[in-house]
Image (spheres, rainbow, N blue to C red):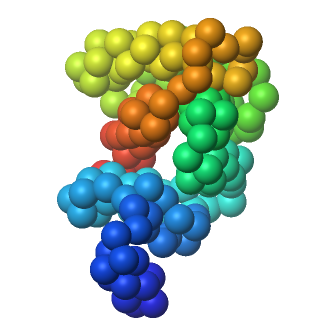
Amino acid sequence: EFAEIFNETLSHFGLEYTLTKNGFLPKVDKIIFEEIYHPVMESLASIKWKPVNDLLTESFAEYRRKTPEGYSTCLTKTISTLQAFLQILVGNKIGDGDLAELLKKARKDGLVPEDIFTKDILNIFKSHLMHQRRLKSDAHPAGADATASDARLAIHIVLVFINHCMVP
């Protein structure tokens, strides 16, 4: 209830953030928050998902810096969030695993839905994320800085995927 009142107050001042249990998140449309962000945050609240939750929280913190370096780090941490999610899903721990192989194993083992999203659409997004990581993240010498749009798109892709896998 406090968060609802606080968020309403933030909106009156034109601030573009929403307070959650994970800290402040970039403000998104109410339906996106209610249907994707909130259910994912609730699903990741257990101790099993702590490494994923921590990376996602760091991603949001970097996004809030509103600098090219912050957006680049946000991009890196968001991709690491997806990788950690798949590592825990497939092997119950973080550590090893390339995204493509983890996703393939998760599909094979029935840990993610076997549908057009995880087969085709996610592969397109994965290619996009890896391309952005190579060009704009701080994981490699970047050719260009990431933008707020790059960081937001990465966050949304990862949250939609986690939502698709975890939220009934």
Residue 4 visible, this angle? no
Is 131 positioned to the left or the right of 54 in the image? left
Residue 107 visible, this angle? yes
Is 161 positioned to the left or the right of 91 in the image? left
Closest to the observer, 55 or 48: 55
Residue at image point 62% right, 9% down: 143
Is 48 positioned to the left or the right of 105 in the image? right
**How far across and how far down the image is residue 168, in percent?**
30, 52
Quarter of the image for residue 100 reads: top right
Question: Vertical placement of 77 versus 114: above or below?
Answer: below
**How far across and how far down the image is residue 113, in percent?**
34, 30
Question: Vertical placement of 115 versus 60: above or below?
Answer: above
Query: In which quadrant will I find the N terminus?
Result: bottom left
Is 34 positioned to the left or the right of 10 in the image? left
**How far across and how far down the image is residue 49, in percent?**
63, 51
Quarter of the image for residue 98 reads: top right
Residue at image point 34% right, 70% down: 14
Residue at image point 61% right, 50% down: 65
Residue at image point 32% right, 55% down: 28
**How far across and how far down the image is residue 43, in percent?**
48, 57
Marker count (numbered): 0
Question: Vertical placement of 43 versus 7: above or below?
Answer: above
